[in-house]
Amino acid sequence: MKQINIILILLLIGAVSNAQTPVQIKVDGMSCGFCVNGVEKKFSKSKEVKDLHVDLEKGMVTFNVAKGVKVDKDKYTGLVEKAGYEPRQIMVGDEIKAEGVGFAKQINYTPQPEGIITSTFKVSGNCDMCKKKIETAAKSVKGVKSAVWDKDTKMITVKYDDKKAKLTDIHNKIASVGYDTDKVKGDDKAYDKLHACCQYDRE
């Protein structure tokens, strides 16, 4: 009887050791299939990430981490940020089932003040020089708290005070330095003055 119990315990330990660790990240800012592709591209570079699924409707990124690999929350929320989006909640393993487990408790997230809006949209561009110009233009609008443009996905994520700035102001400012957004065409003269490596293919 003892031998049977020992065998069952060993089998249970083996099953646990072979199990992958589930991870769930709530993400703000994704709005289209292009957003999904951008997130998937960032996570695809991590070999330990398995069964990745991006749910656009729920704003959720779920995946499993390969057995024996420690889950690095900062790494995975960082991948979301590099893709140009805002990680709002990350839960690992049993945390996913537990009720009332908040993002603030898990990675010391500080909620955004009331009135701060996060918006993501497309901006054409090619390189790091473009990144600097696009982000600088967006940040120059009064009320904009931050702006991050990803040269791979061509998406910019901006945080702004909606009492001080309008989203159209940010689009117009970026367009004024020669870059097309998904709503406003870049200024032609400013585009012509861009460095050769920055002159992206215009639609």
Image (spheres, rainbow, N blue to C red):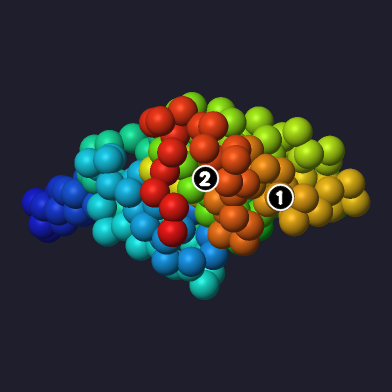
Residue 194 visible within the image: yes
- Identify the disc placed on residue 80: none
Which residue lies most toward the bottom here? 57
* Nearest to N terminus: mark 1 or mark 2: 2
Q: Nearer the viewer, residue 102 or 56?
A: 56
Distance between mark 1 and mark 2 Cα atoms: 20 Å
* Residue labelled with disc 1: 172
Crowd rating for badge 2 (residues with CA inside 10 Å; few <14, some 14–19, many 20+): many
Q: Residue at x 63, y 57 (%)?
A: 184
Residue 78 visible within the image: no
**Quadrant of the drawing holding the C terminus:** bottom left
Q: Give the image location of residue 110, x and y in percent.
A: 73, 39
Residue type, numbered disc 2: Gly
Q: Give the image location of residue 48, x and y in percent.
A: 25, 42
Q: Regarding mark 1 in the picture, which secondary structure is present there? A: helix
Q: Nearer the viewer, residue 194 or 126?
A: 194
Q: Give the image location of residue 80, x and y in percent.
A: 48, 45
